[in-house]
Image: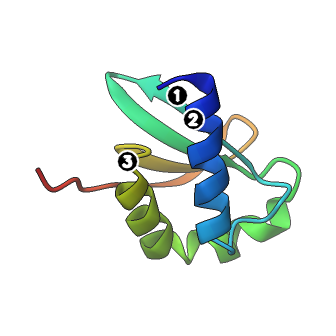
Amino acid sequence: MSAELEELVIREFRELTAVVPEKCLVFRRIENQKIVLCLDFTLCPQEALNTMEKSPQLTLISHKLGLADILVFRINRHLIGWTNIRKNN
């Protein structure tokens, strides 16, 4: 995916998921041949648990946009949670 398209899709993800705080960093990366959507709460750690409670909504929207295989919640380099995103072929 081109950088411009990826930025556009992540912006759309943010718009569709009003529960993701503005200060939360949202980016994708590849790990073990899986695409991971990372939500990094380094700048807003107090918002992490509330946002994680909304993971079903986040995974549904991520799936619809084709963003990732896995959704990861973290604070800086510390993993605080994750969920697999099931894709129906």
Indicate the secondary structure of the residue bearing disc 2.
helix
Q: Position of residue 53 (x, y in %)?
A: 56, 77
Q: What residue type is labelled 1?
A: Arg
Q: Position of residue 80 (x, y in %)?
A: 60, 53
* Figure quadrant of residue 14: bottom right
Of pointers 3 and 1, the one earlier in the residue sequence = 1
The residue carrying mark 2 is: 6
Of pointers 2 and 1, the one earlier in the residue sequence = 2
Q: Estimate the spatial distance between the alpha carbons at disc 3 and disc 2, rounded to whole Å.
A: 11 Å
Q: 43 or 27: which is nearer to us?
A: 27
Indicate the secondary structure of the residue bearing disc 1.
strand
Q: 78 or 64: which is nearer to us?
A: 64
Q: What residue type is labelled 3?
A: Gly
Report the residue at 52% width, 48% height from top: 72
Q: 36 or 9: which is nearer to us?
A: 9
Label 3 CA crowd tier, 10 Å (few <14, some 14–19, many 20+) = few
The residue carrying mark 1 is: 29
Of pointers 3 and 2, the one earlier in the residue sequence = 2
Indicate the secondary structure of the residue bearing disc 3.
loop
Q: 8 or 19: which is nearer to us?
A: 8
Label 1 CA crowd tier, 10 Å (few <14, some 14–19, many 20+) = few
Label 2 CA crowd tier, 10 Å (few <14, some 14–19, many 20+) = some
Q: Position of residue 17 (x, y in %)?
A: 61, 70
The circle drawn on residue 66 is 3
* Figure quadrant of residue 65: bottom left
Image-based side of 29 in relation to 26, left or right: left
Image-based side of 70 in relation to 7, left or right: left
Report the residue at 15% width, 56% height from top: 88
Q: What residue type is labelled 2?
A: Glu
Do the numbered discs 3 and 2 sit on residues whose CB atoms are within 8 Å?
A: no
Report the residue at 34% width, 30% height from top: 34
Q: Estimate the spatial distance between the alpha carbons at disc 2 and disc 1, rounded to whole Å.
A: 11 Å
